[in-house]
Structures are given as structure tokens and as C-alpha cells.
Image: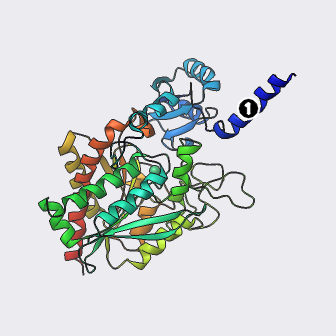
Amino acid sequence: MNMSTWIKVALGIVLCLTQCHGKKDYSGDQVLTIYPASEEQVKFVQRLPEADFWSPKYAEEVNIEKPVDVLIPRHVLGNVKESLGEEDISYKVMIEDVQAAMDNQVKGRMSRAGHELVHDYNVYHPVEEIEQWMADISAEYPSLVTYEQLGVSTEGRNMHMMTISTNPDNPAILIDCTFHAREWISPAFCQCFTRNLLEGYGTDPLFTKQLNSLTYYIIPLINPDGYKYSWDEERLWRKTRSKYEGDECYGTDANRNCDANYGGEGSSGDSCSITYRGPYVESEPEVKAFADFTRAHLSKIMAYVSVHSYSQLVVLPRSYTGVPTPTLDVLMKYAKQAADEIYRVHGTVYTYGQGSSSLYFVSGGSKDFAYDIGVPWTCTLELRDTGEYGFLLPEDQIEPVCVETTAALRSFSDAAIELWLNRD
Ligand SMILES: [Zn+2]
């Protein structure tokens, strides 16, 4: 090797150290929607190699009633399609090229880079920008917002919460976003809802009335480590970023780590599973901080909404048992009201029901934890869509999602106030 070749190699290594740090490339990967039509076909789909199940979330929940959205990596794609054909299992391609869909999700953001003087609510933001936005908007409305640290994540990030209130004696609604890192529409919604609420106070009669009667606790980034990882390393990362002695893989599913039938059906003991429940209940500092806060403010919290995606669902407690929840009638009433409000905005159809029957079994979930300790109205909201873009919802859908979901939150707020006035 001569001197100039050595220099080129050395430069290549330096360049690689700064640029090719292993951000996962999904070029050529596809998401398929598969329609298994018999128990045999279900079993076949459950065993697909290297499959990342998007909906349902894991192989065991695949059944003949619902289509299955699943990401298949490029190096096994040909074989998988061939074998589906051989087994006579029908499918369609939902996402042609996963990396292209990911690039499309930040297209507007990239084209506007450097021009942003104000926070742009129509693009997705990384963790640092959301943190800055929280500090900024709290400073902008000092008489309405208290900005405080809720806890510290595994990797040492401060988890912040905004309390938006006109009277400390008011009952409260607790809203969190980003339990699952790859569901980017969730924190985008938390941001635009906060803006709507703050701008609406004093100008919009309904928001003004609601904020005069109700305190809003809003946690936009409950899983900041996982969210950061989904931006920098692996776009489809879902879990936290903890790792425990004896465990092979990183990350706990925060929504399996709560104190609600912890360890039961719909959670995994395998650290490499996307539904890993962690080594013990509330092992995740993020979950512990959320749970401690909820317990400490239980007398005031009338409603709790955890914002996820995707499937367009209002999921009611409980997800860990098929036994109907004692207050299911009331919950169904409020869920229907919210779904109706969403439908009125753009005609987007949401379905609703008890989690174990409308979706799948989940143990250790946050909405069941909140319900079990006494919050009367709790749900998980699964935002758009129902299987066109899945987790890779384009930027131009942020605004319509924001408007329709704000309508649902207004409905939840009314329910919270009603529950407070009618409490024993
Ligand atoms: Zn989720």
C-alpha cells in the first residue's frame, strides 16, 4: 500500500467513525399485510423468520379474524413471499420500501431545516427539540404552566411534566405520550394538544371552561431514552434502554412494567422480546416516576389517557382479563362519545371496547394500573392509521390527527369534570 492509499484508508476510518455509526438501514425491507384464513395458515404466519410484527404486536396474537401487518427484512423477503404463495396464503405489500417511508417521514423537516424560528408542529421532533419546546412554551405561559421534573431515565435524561392549571384545587386529567418509542405521532400529538389548550384559554369558550375546571398533567416524553434511540439508531425501537444482569438484550416494554397483573398473559419474560416486562414490577425508572406521581395525586386524577399508535382504537380497561370491568358501561359511554367526536371532524373511524376483547391481552399496562388504583376513567388511545403507513405516518397527517384527537381529549375532559362532580 502506498502513502496515498494509506491516507485514503485512514480518512475512510475517520469518516466512518463520525458517520457510519451503525444507524439501522431498512432499505428494501417491506411491510406485508397477510390474511391467514385457517388455523394452519395462522401457525405458518406465526413462524415467519425474522418477522417484526406491527399489528398484532407479536406472533402469539395472530388469528384468522384480523389481517396481520408484519415487517420482513430484505434478505428473507423473497423466500417469505415464495412460501406464502406455496401455502396459498393471501397477502399484499403494505409498505414497498420501509427506508423510503422512513425518509418520507422527515422530508418536510429536512427541507425546512435552518429556517425554524418558531416550533413547527407539523414535523416530527427529536428529543432535544421537544425538551426545548417544553421549556419555551412553559416560559411563554407562566401563569398557566408549571414545568417540573418528574424523574430521571435510565440513561440520565430528565423526564419533564407540564401542569397546566388555573386552580390547584381542580380535579385533573393525566395525559402521557411516547410509552413506545417508535410511535412518533404520539409525542407530536402531545405537543400540538398542549399548544391548542394554551392558545385556546381565553379565546376558545370550551377550552376556557374546561381549563377553569380541570388541571392537565401532560407528559410528552415518558420514554425519552427509547425515543432518542428511535431517532439516532433504530427507527422501529419500541422499548426503554435499560439492560439487566443476566439479560441478553436491551430494553423493557414500559407498558408491560406497571403494577397491573404484572407478569401475566400478554407480556414476555424474554429480554429480547418487544413485550419484555422487565425483571420486576416498576423496574424502569420512567415507569416508577409515572406510577409514583399517579399514586400521590390519586385523589385528584379523574381521567388518564395514554397516547399510542396505531389502530384507531379507544382501548378500555382491563386488558389482562376477559372478565368485564365493573364500570364498563360508564367507560363504554365515554369511549363512544370520544369516538363520535373524532368521527365528526374528518370521518375517521375509531372503534372501542375493553382491551382484552377489542385488541389483545396485555399485562402490566399503564391504563390498567391507573384504573386498578382508582382512577375512574382510563384508556389507551391508539391513533392513526389502520394499516397504510402504520408507525411511519407521514408529516402531513400530524395536523389532521391533532385536530381530531383534540376533539377526543375535549370529550375526555368533560367526562373527567362530570366524574368529579358526581363523586361520592
Ligand atoms: Zn404503543
The structure residue drawn at horizontal position 17% and vertical position 45%, both measured from the top left corner, is 344
Left or right position of 338 against 101: left
Front in this rendered view, residue 214 or 306: 214
Q: Quadrant of residue 310?
A: top left
Front in this rendered view, residue 112 or 390: 112
Query: Can the viewer see residue 236?
Result: yes
Residue 188 location (% of width, % of height): 37, 49
Residue 84 location (% of width, % of height): 56, 22
Left or right position of 392 against 285: left
Residue 278 location (% of width, % of height): 62, 60
Left or right position of 232 against 95: right
Front in this rendered view, residue 51 or 290: 290
For the N terminus, the quadrant is: top right
Q: Is mark 1 within 8 Å of ligand 1?
A: no
Q: Quadrant of residue 138?
A: bottom left
Front in this rendered view, residue 367 or 222: 222
In this view, 370 is above or below 424: above
Q: Residue furthest front?
A: 3
Task: Determine which residue is flagged by label 1.
Answer: 11
In this view, 215 is above or below 177: below
Q: Amino acid at mark 1?
A: Leu
For the C terminus, the quadrant is: bottom left
**What colouring style does the render use?**
rainbow
The structure residue drawn at horizontal position 56% and vertical position 38%, both measured from the top left corner, is 52
In this view, 203 is above or below 77: below
Q: Residue furthest right?
A: 1
